[in-house]
Amino acid sequence: MSEAVLLRSVARGDQRAFDELYRRYYRRLKRFLAKRFPPSQSADEIINDTLFIVWQHANEFHYSSQVSTWIFGIAYRVALKSLRKHRVWLRAITTDGLTDPVLDPTRADEDRQWLAEGLRRLPDKQRLSLVLTYHFGHSVEQVALMTDCPVGTIKARIFHARGKLRRHLSAIQ
């Protein structure tokens, strides 16, 4: 059964469809959260809150994007809310653990450190937009949905982040 069909059934209150959607998304959401947020946060709690929102608002989904984009966007916003409550927002968006896949693994540690420092210097929203698109491979449209921002805003953040990174990297070489 496709995710769109499952979501339509969930919107009608079908518990079995919700159980299936939960099974399909639990591991994916766990990986998604593990890559983006500190391990000290309760991923299970965030996943449960996310899927509870899906259960409550399934009838509001407009099918203008993929079901997965909508669900991951909800998870992202629920996780950010949780992080803000626990005052670990700044630790959550540092580049620890996120820089290695961005770089060619054959590059020197020094290059990785330069890039990590450049990423750390970016404003939070620019760094997040850049990491979600380049590191995690999300489209600008998907990032806009996840962060509840206009596409143009995400494009501008990425543009400015790349410029700042370029200036930072050229200044230290």
Image: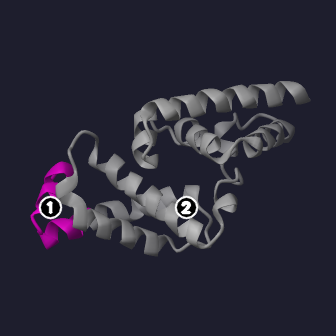
Percent x, y of residue 120: 75, 46
| Residue at figure coordinates x 46%, y 38% from the top left | 138
Q: Is residue 171 left or right of residue 158?
A: right
Percent x, y of residue 69: 35, 47
| Residue at figure coordinates x 78%, y 38% from the top left | 118
Q: Which residues are magenta?
A: 1-21
Can residue 84 be seen here? yes
| Residue at figure coordinates x 46%, y 41% from the top left | 143
Q: Which residue is mark 1?
A: 11
Q: Residues within 10 Å of mark 2 (few under 14, many from 20)?
A: some
Query: What's the residue type where badge 2 is placed?
Result: Ala
| Residue at figure coordinates x 34%, y 61% from the top left | 25
Query: Main SS of the magenta segment?
Result: helix
Above or below for 79 versus 105: below
Depth check: give the residue in front, 43 or 126.
Answer: 126
Query: What's the residue type where badge 1 is placed?
Result: Ala
Which image quadrant is residue 65 in? Answer: top left
Figure label count: 2
Percent x, y of residue 113: 82, 43
Name the quadrant of the C terminus.
Answer: top right
Q: Is residue 136 left or right of residue 105?
A: left
What is the spatial separation of the Cα atoms under label 2 and label 1, in whole angstroms?
28 Å
Percent x, y of residue 123: 69, 43
Q: Which residue is mark 2?
A: 34
- Badge 2 or badge 1: first in the primary sequence: 1
Above or below for 128 versus 18: above
Q: Is residue 123 left or right of residue 27?
A: right
